[in-house]
Image (spheres, rainbow, N blue to C red):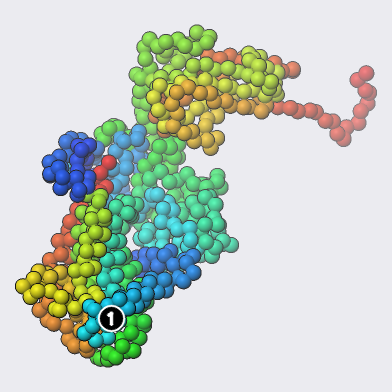
Amino acid sequence: MTSLTPAYPSRQWVYVRDLLRELVIRNVKIRYKGSILGIFWSLIFAVAQVRLFALLFRSGLGRDIPNFPAYVFVGILVWGWFSSSLNGCSNAITGNRELVGRPGFPVGVLPVVTIGTSLIDFLMAFPVLMAFIIFGGSQLTTGLLLLPLIMILQFLFMQGLGYLLATAQVLFRDTTHLLSVILRLGFFLTPIFYNPERMLPPHYQWIYNLNPMVHVIDAYRAILLYGQLPALLPVLYVVGLTALLLPLGYRTFRHARYRFLEEL
Amino acid sequence: MQDAIVVHELGKQFRRYDANRPRRLKELFIRGPHKLKPVEQFWALREIEFHLEPGRMIGVIGRNGSGKSTLLRLIGDVLKPDEGWVKTQGRIGALLNLGSHFHSDLTGRENVYVSGVIAGLTRREVAERFDSIVAFAELEEFIDGPLRTYSTGMRMRLAFAVAVHIEPDILLIDEVLAVGDLAFRQKCFERIQQFKEEGCTILLVTHDIGQVKDLCDEAIWLHQGKLMAHDDPNTVVTEYEMAMRAETRRRTPKAQAESSNNGKLVANKNRFGSQEVNIRNVRLLDGQGAPVTELNSGEPLCVEIEYDASIAIEAPIFSITIDHEEYKICCTTNTVASGLTLPTLQGSGQIRTYFERLDLNGGRYFINVGVYEQNWNYSYDFHWRAYPLTIQAGGSEKGVLHPPHRWELAGATVLRSSD
């Protein structure tokens, strides 16, 4: 279908921004209304998890990792954003039948809303993360300015994956279950509470490094804990993957939307 | 003038898949990728051709599954045609599934913003229209309370108020015009009228042929994905109704068992319907529950219908009409109009209607009873003029009403008393 007088582009831009904002705010409000600890709930959980790991692995896995609690906290937060985003994205089409069938609704925003909602949790934890970093003896440097870039990269990477997962969920309704198993496995195959260089035999290292989240978490740590620039090649690997996944994901996602509405 | 909507040789195919198609990855791994291809394809719509000038309103009627909603979705660009094309001019807005984005824990205000943005407005546009939305919904005092404290009627009013504050060039409406009480409905219809005056082109999908007649400038009738008629609303509605009646007659079995107690029922003469639900017996009862054929004016009447549904029937409608002998309909009532949605019925049972007073004038009347498909598409069983009822009333026998009444003389000088 062609629209002969397209809405002027700047309005569409403002509209999508407002739509994202309203839907994210709604999700956050719904999640925290009626819960006593409100928005701090997930934060408390993350901190408790860090304390537990620090306690368990102080003399084992974390023995020669400096500022081990901050190290674990970065891993848990980044992974938490990743896994809750993907879980939400896999239902982006099947869980929003009404929006998906609404004329004029830009469905492409649905995964972005999910990722954006989890991002709020991530951002809420930042002050606490900063405290962990500083009290643990690491220094905050100007490298911190790179942080938004790495977050944008992670966002786009998850968005690409999210489109694909939402599509898969339309075709096979157990995608979500499979995904939660994979994410649980991924938690251990990603350096969240250990240092892979010490744990893995060198000739398996390359397989381990295929996991893009390894490099994403490494990049966060380089910036936040070590005051360094992230290693360039691994980051380029993630950029390359994203450049592939995002257009591919978006195309299949749009197709899946039509397919979903045709199902009887 | 440039048309707002052009639909050219439009066709949409749906696919039916094997019931054993792997729906889960688990099954796909176990059984392999066969049966992924659709087993059957059928045309949900085909060879649809029409165009609509700006500012016109078109009604789309047809039975369930005739392709009405598919047409709306194709025009709204949420489905892709398999044949032909649709061209639209301008921004498309939609009134469908009102209130489906509302969340009970959020306040009315918060819900207005969310659903306004979903409906296609920017935040600033919602803010500008906010007071007008709340005023339209008549919810000024409640707008900052959580939605969970709203009644269903209040929610619907709010949902409708948000939905009509968009300014689309084309408006697609699916079955949502009947919300709220009579006064609010009137307001909704006025707003629709206003949309038209502003040059908005409207496509209305509905079962309510009354709305099509009252509101639309033209109408189309879809049947099994085909365009049966496109004309002015009265013509199309008449054709549609005639076809539905013919459908009822066609479904009436030729030689059906005469199971009614009085044995006077003859198929297609005074008994019509597909007999998927069978009215086995009808009894007219007086206030004490005793069968009657004669009542005094003002006495109560109970009509008892004994039905038998051979298969499970979803939400049938029961209807009763009281006819005067001289072919005047005095009174009609049905379960839907009385706000009663029946559950899925199977097997036999009884349903009763109580008339607390029957203030009819003296004369001969008939009670017609019927049971209909949930959208009035055809009748399952309809008994016409099979159950006579005589009403006795003092005084004149002209007219059909005999309400309780008295005469009072006031302000007159009485010269001589009558006795």
Q: Residue at x 86, y 34 (%)?
A: B410
Q: Residue at x 43, y 18 (%)?
A: B272
Q: Which residue is mark 1?
A: A58
Pick the residue in front: A130 or A104.
A130
Relative to A25, say whether B284 is above or below.
above
Quarter of the figure with residue A60: bottom left
Q: Residue furthest front?
A: A59
Query: The disc numbered 1 marks a residue on which chain?
Result: A
Q: Quadrant of the C terminus of chain B?
A: top right
Q: Residue furthest top?
A: B263
Q: Is residue A102 visible?
A: no
Relative to B20, say whether B168 is above or below.
below
Is residue B298 shown left or right of residue A203?
right
On the image, the x and y values in percent for residue B327 come to 55, 18
Q: Residue at x 75, y 28 (%)?
A: B405
Q: Residue at x 34, y 75 (%)?
A: A52
Quarter of the figure with residue B377: top left
Is residue B85 shown left or right of residue B58?
left
On the image, the x and y values in percent for residue A173 come to 25, 50
On the image, the x and y values in percent for residue A191 come to 20, 74
Q: Is residue A86 visible?
A: yes
Is residue B102 shown left or right of residue A56?
right
